[in-house]
Amino acid sequence: MRLEVDGTALEVDPQPGQVLRTLLRQHGVTSVKKGCDAGDCGACSVLVDGVPVHSCITPAHRMDGRSVTTAAGLGAPEHPHPVQRAFAEAPGFQCGFCTAGFVVTASTLTDDDLADRHRKLKGNLCRCTGYRAIEDALDGVSNTACAAAGAAVGTSVAAPAAMRIVTGQEEYTLDVPGDPAVRATEALLHLAVLGSPHPHARIAAIDTAAAEALPGVHAVLTYRDDPGVLFSTGRHESRLDDPDDTRVLDRVLRFRGQRVAAVVADSVRTAEQACALVHVDYEVLPSVHDVDAARRPGAPLLHGDKTSAEHRIAEPTRNVVASLHGGTGDVDGALATSAATVDGVWHTGRVSHAALETHATRGWVDPDGRLVLRTATQVPFLVRDEIARVFTLDPARVRVVAKRVGGGFGGKQELLTEDLVTLAVLRTGRTVQYEFSRRDEFTIAPTRHPMRVRVRLGADTDGTLTAMHVDQTMDTGAYGNHGIGVMFHSVSESVAVYRCPVKRVDAESVYTNNLPSGAFRGYGLGQVVFAIESAMDELARELGIDPLELRRRNVVVPGDPLVVTDPHEETDLRWESSYGLDQCLDLVEQALAGPLPEVPPMDGPVLRGPGLDRSPDWAYGTGVALAAIATMPPRGHHAHTSVELLPGGRYRIGVGTAEFGNGTTTVHTQLVATALGTTPDRVDVHQSDTDAARHDTGAFGSAGVVVAGRALYAAAQALRDDLTARALALVAARTPRTASGVLGPAVAVGPEGVRVGDELVGHAQLLAEGPLIAHASHDGTPRSLAFTVHGARVAVHRPTGEVRVLQSVQAVDAGTVLNPEQLRGQVEGGAAQAIGSTLYEEVVLDDAGRVTTDAFRSYRVPKISDVPRTQVLFADTHDPLGPLGAKSMSEAPYNPVAPAIANAVRDAIGVRPYRLPMTRDRVWALLADATDAGGA
């Protein structure tokens, strides 16, 4: 069969049933991405004879004689298509994994199509941007600019990879090029996993003979091949932060889909066929899927064979991985004497990270005998260290490389594929690849922790808080990865942000036979903030005080102590000198007082707000909420960096931080360019590779800028000092000066070298005496606080329960804004993700722990038509703890959104929502119950 791909003739022989996406990638066309393999996300979009199609559902055999154009065929970085240039300049991407598909589809849109863009682009999903920047790209709006030498900070500099991303040339995990140093593609083997059909079982017997006999099978791995070392898939700087409760392959299976066996074969198809030939006899064990039932006497124990001291599990005999019970004062007594009280229980659901790039690892042994793992991870150094520990390897003999990662949100702070690939590589001596399917992402990858949060509040008549009690229970699932940290963090800043003389927290993280939960943007704060901020809103109603005013009267201000209930809480928070919460409250109040922006048509008529086109079927409401978050993770977050002068006046930075749409790469180049008097385009980045730096804890907790960025800026300053010293020495050597006290000449580092008075010392002269490189590190302490306030106006359709967000505004205290457009995008993306989990998204399990939402068509990630533009406002603050005064702002935007929308819904319909997501059926049921009770 012959076809043309990006202008080149290709002769192929498709396999039976093969689709176009796999055919193209099989022949090296890596600009086509895998996001779902079900025609739901659009990451694989290509043009077939000029018509956009999803190549993952297009039969390959139908391409005979056809012309296929991918993003790479539309244009190259040097000569991009106009749409590609627009996406680069907007910029209409963050992680960029969806971008190749978007530009392919957008390249076919006419002016009439652009007016109907939401329908035309309904087949393309973006998880990062919130879609505003994509719409700007469609409208030809440029939001980026070039920076002057030495003045990059504060400018909306474009990402260094922008043109490569929009043209499909940027490398992601499995886009392996022909470079022998990273290729290792010869004789590539593939791994597939047989998952448990039971939520709790013990392997009584397993027979792999038939699978091993299948032609093309190289190994079948079972619990007999497990290295015998317990670990956690959750990764932190200190591995002691997580319980040791997991094996690479375990004989006891604790949730549906858990690994029973792994097959390594010539192809994915052969490996999957072999999985079906593995015969397993299971001893089915009783399972428990409810957190209350799991803690009752006689409940099935998931990790009863482990101990608190050795495995760091709080109470294995109660299925409790972590607990916290403590406070200040007598809560019950204070509530009893309060003028007003609120008591409610709020529930949050499981949420999938839904990153467009699924978890994937390719591993091999390099010519020097080192194990190399090329993997989709936010934490390459932590993966390296744990792989070395589990398999008893010298860490120096393990290299972990993360290319650009297609979305993370905390989901890639887990070790989910690397361990199996390591086991397979060590067993076979061959190159092995393991890639999650989209179904895997929904059914076995960790989700956001579902929580039940009871909040009791008391206040005096003037609104001053008198008591706060938070009782939180969370389902950590079958394993405790992040089950300790999320629990402690969820009741930290969420409680500490308010002044209150009497506080108590009761929190427990509970094992169940459900799929594991894990790290997710906000790290538990979003769930508890939803409950506390909803309760604060209800308290304002009880007292007849404006919700914003009630918050102003009770939030911490400089000079207040942060009253926390965790006796082990770090005391390194220094936030008083960069306080912007008051500004954020004012900015949101002003924005909500303004005219309501017109809402684009979605599935129904345009809504123009109160006073315009009002219908009795629609109810309108306004809500606000606030949140605080530490700017770095506690208990240590480290980054070691380097900056080196290269010939020609370029600089090379070495940093371990991974780029997955967080924008750290862009900001790192800005910081270095500013310190060294050059421009960002002259800074080369070697990152997210254990060969790139001595150590980096990783890109989580929004630490990529405030930890690694601060270290890089310090290294750049040190190099600038070295350059200055060397230039002064060279000038002094050829222009002798007397020791008569003459003042030294003015010195300035710039793009062409170092100017000493009237003399320019060029880069070649500076390098003549040897390399110039500087190193610096940062340990992530002390930490500061970042604040966010969200406001929302909504319309609720009484007959159906549909909620539409008419206005979304968030004010953020981010310190010095290093890149305004990028920061705006992070806030918009966080708000959009939160809108998804507030109104649409939920991973649903049946009573037996089976995931029933295992595809994008049953799990609703917001489309371009679902998300309003979030107005982003910046407080004017400067944080002395951050690089050039900046604070982190990637996790924070998520946390206040759900309660703001819930408070707006309460304002609209007079009934309080207590459960997320607020889907149409749930809101309709609230309205129906209120009507039956004689209410709204």
Image (cartoon, rainbow, N blue to C red):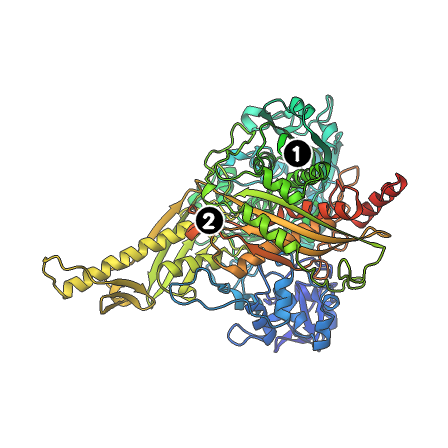
Asked if disc 1 and disc 2 are in contact, CB closer than 8 Å, the reply is no
Examine the rendering and report whether any part of residue 343 can be seen. yes
Q: Along the line of sight, which residue is nearer the eye, 553 or 677?
A: 553
Q: Residue at x 43, y 40 (%)?
A: 781
Q: Amino acid at mark 2?
A: Val
Examine the rendering and report whether any part of residue 370 can be seen. no
Q: Residue at x 56, y 72 (%)?
A: 85
User: Which of the image's four quarters has the C terminus?
Assistant: top right
Q: Along the line of sight, which residue is nearer the eye, 740 or 670?
A: 740
Q: Secondary structure at mark 2?
A: helix
In this view, 229 is above or below 108: above
Crowdedness near tag 1: few (<14), some (14–19) or many (≥20) residues, C-alpha within 10 Å: some
Q: Please name the residue that numbered disc 1 is placed on.
A: 251
Give the image quarter of residue 926: top right
Q: Please name the residue that numbered disc 2 is placed on.
A: 706
Q: Position of residue 843 (x, y in %)?
A: 73, 46
Q: Secondary structure at mark 1?
A: loop
Q: Is residue 275 left or right of residue 247?
A: right
Q: Amino acid at mark 1?
A: Arg
Whichever of callouts 1 and 2 sits on the residue coming sooner in the sequence is: 1
In this view, 603 is above or below 919: below
In this view, 22 is above or below 561: below
Q: Which mark is residue 866?
A: none
